Image (cartoon, grey):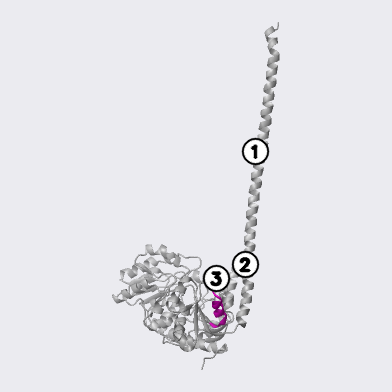
Amino acid sequence: MTDTATLLEAPAAVADVDARLQQLEAFSTQVSAAIDQLVGAVVDVQQAKASDALMAELDSVKAKLREVEQTLSLERANRDLAQVSRMHAKQRIVVFVGTTYFGCNVKYAWAATLQRAQALGLQVWWLPYNAEQEGIVTALGGSCLPTSYAQWTPAHIHTVLSAAVVVTSDHLLNPNPYAAALLAGARQLQLWHGVSIKEIGLRNLPSGRALGPHLARVLSTCGPYARMLGTAAAGEAEWRRWFSFERYAPIGYPRNDVLYREPTESDLAGCDLETYERAQAALSGGKRVILYAPTFRDGRSEWVLQAGLDKLAQAAMQGGDLLVVNLHPVESPQIPKLAPLLPGVAFVQPRSDLYPLLGKTSALITDYSSVMFDYLHLDRPVLFFRPDHAAYTQKSRKLFDDKLPVLPGPLFDDAAALAKALRRTDLGQTEAHAQARARLHREWFDHHDGNAGQRLTALVIEELALAGLPECA
């Protein structure tokens, strides 16, 4: 029989269950709403991320479009400025174009011409590669265009457009994007930067994969020149393999003039004075100064240490000699790594003028560098170190070395063998090597007098006359 109290409590229990169900349903609704909100938030985040990515991509496209627009605008401006330069009236103004450092043939050509500028009624200007050059030229009393084209005044632009002659010793690729166009109407004299046994200029061609705007620009600056300046009449055909020009003049290299005299203040400008003085002191103390000047290797900046530079340094130190190392500018960033490993070696400061230093050395070690030909003016020992000849000639540069049927010095492909030669009093030199040096000097330099700078100035006057600007009476 059912308990009366239980029956009386039943409606209350049912009411409590209903209340609980209502609470559970309300909670379920809240949970569902929370889940919906969470899902919505996730979707919003994903959409936001997608939107951000899209916006970033759009910004990238806009930047590329602006870059293309600027490039096209620059090309159009240079095309028109080149036309302006060609039709602009010319004056007795010559502009010397600086290379990446204050040196090479153009430096000495500029200094020689500046000395005679007033007597010849010339305006001589320097187009700097960087602010350092601007400071050097100004300190030496020369007229220098501002490094930044944004600082050029109308007078500067007029000066460049009025230039009748421009002298270079490399590809005309000045950082000023308008420089080449503004000088397009001038007669260009190309001194280049050395007698070469490597294929250069129009014969230094890559595979199709390497073709691109920069390479095309470099090749386009291989001429046409009004005049190519070389060292020997016999070299004209060789230069015509590599460059395009109207006339050829074998006047010699102005940078070699310093090898026939004690360096002047102008000569030493841009030189590594610390290494120069160190070499001078070593010679005065009866020591030999051995200069190692290799050319660069494509994509193998640390090759020089792997080839055994430490063995050469040890041999020099044991003999009481000073080893001076002049790395190619492409590889000079390695010096901070190499110098601590070889404390007795004097590394030539990057982007400095080597030529005053050549006269303070006893012998040269090189591989394929054109400095070997310049060194012939000193008639001192030359040694060749080619530890990777097969790889270099097959993967880096082809050689055009018909001019070297006999090397003017011993050849080594092993650092240990070269180090052994460095310990010898005669450095492994023979009479045959001396004869080869003399023969090459005669064949590849028509002049042996240190007056190439003066001959360059005379050619500038000739080019002014060809431009319709003869000397004043």
Q: Name the outermost residue toward the top.
A: 1
Q: Which residue is mark 2?
A: 70
Mark 3 is on which residue type?
Ala
In this rendering, would 187 be left or right of 355?
Answer: right
Q: Is residue 461 above or below residue 130?
A: below
Q: Mark 2 or 1 closer to N-term?
A: 1
Comparing 159 with 67, the one in front is 159
- Prevailing secondary structure class for the magenta stretch in the rendered image: helix
Dot 3 or dot 1: first in sequence order is 1
Q: Which residues are magenta?
A: 151-165
At x 67%, y 25%, the residue is 23
Which quadrant holds the N terminus? top right
Question: Which residue type carries mark 1?
Answer: Leu
* Above-or-below relation of 188 to 46: below
Label 2 amino acid?
A: Gln
Q: Nearer the viewer, mark 3 or mark 1?
A: 3
* Element type at mark 1: helix
Residue at the limit of the structure toward the bottom, as seen here: 473
Report if the CB atoms under discs 3 and 1 are less than 8 Å apart: no
Q: Which callout, 2 or 3, points at the residue further toward the start of the chain?
A: 2
Secondary structure of residue under mark 3: helix
Snapshot quadrant of residue 316: bottom left
- Discs 2/3, front: 3
Image position of 453 with respect to 366: above or below: below
Label 3 to label 1: alpha-carbon separation: 56 Å
Q: Is residue 406 visible?
A: no
The residue under label 3 is 150
> Separation of disc 2 and disc 1 at Cα?
47 Å
When asked about the image quadrant of residue 218, the answer is bottom right
Q: Report the disc number at residue 38.
A: 1
